[in-house]
Image (cartoon, grey):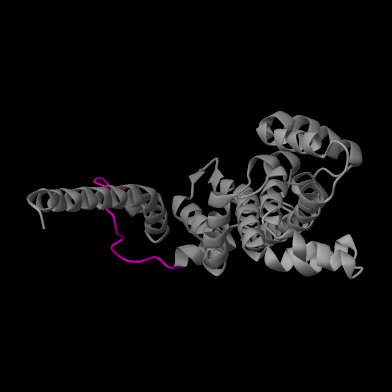
Amino acid sequence: MTPDAADRLPASRLVSMLSHAGLIVVAAGFLFPFFWMISNALRTDAEVFAIPPVLLPKEIQWRNFVQAWLYLPFGRFFLNSAFVSASITAIVLVVSSLAAYAFARMKFPGRSSLFVVYLATLMVPQAVIVIPLFLMMSALGWVNSYQALIAPMAFSSFGAFLMRQFFLTIPDELEEAALVDGASRLRILLTIFVPLSKPALGLLALFTFTGQWNSFLWPLIVVNGPTYATLPLGLTLFQGQQGTEWTYMMAGATISMAPGLILTILLHRYIFAGIAIGSGFGGR
């Protein structure tokens, strides 16, 4: 080993140690709010406002989770969120796959221009379209219903874009062989493209489900009672004129975070594969 190489080795190790230390600090910064939420969910009311603050409860209050579930119709909110999020996710997967196949494999006049316009809708903030959507739901008589929660959110330009980019990476020979055998476009989509697109579909399902599970603005506008309220709306009901039930609210927030965490664990293989697809994006 030359003297220059010997000098560079400690420097590279120092850079590696500093980069790892920086990543640990950043990761701790992201994780601390979750730790604080769970810690407050397990405390007494007095410990929540203790000065100086304490990191861990002296005696774990598991009953806060039971009380949070019974304090409000939390089960109803949970089922509403599950039904709405799962329904939107299923529709988005179907619609995005159909649109992506058309944009990726079918040739028709104005295809590229239409796809650009399709993608341009990604630039429109949700806050801009909230009022027109509400007026549309009101005209249809869907305000305060599952239809109002599901229908406007069931179409995703991002989903069509993600699936199109993946479909473009599938060899043309597979589709041409199926066409020669007499398969229809729909059969080719269902038997060739969809089975080969599990990583992209898993990634899209995760993004869609977690996004809708945590959605607050649209349910707040279109729902006016507890019957169709979702979990984010339900958590706000822990705030009342007599004060805020902080321990119950933190327990409820912890419960509401669990489905997204479980889904992430179940789909982690597809997440990594989907990220690899996204980094490549070998589309045309």
Q: Residue furthest left?
A: 3
Left/right of residue 141 with respect to residue 55 in the rendered view: right
Q: Tell me the quarter of the picture where residue 264 sits.
A: bottom right
- What residue is shown at x 89% (from left), y 42% (from top)? 141
Placement of the N terminus among the 4 image quadrants: bottom left
Numbered marks: total = 0
Depth order, front residue of 141/116: 116
Q: Main secondary structure of the magenta part?
A: loop
Could you say where residue 267 lies in the image, as x and y percent from the top left? 57, 66
**Along the horizontal axis of the image, is 244 left or right of 112?**
left
- Residue nearest the viewer, comparing 132 with 143: 132
Magenta residue span: 49-62
Asked if residue 55 lies in the magenta stretch, the reply is yes
Q: Does residue 172 appear in this view? A: yes
Residue 79 image point, x, y percent: 69, 62
Residue 230, image x, y percentages = 67, 52
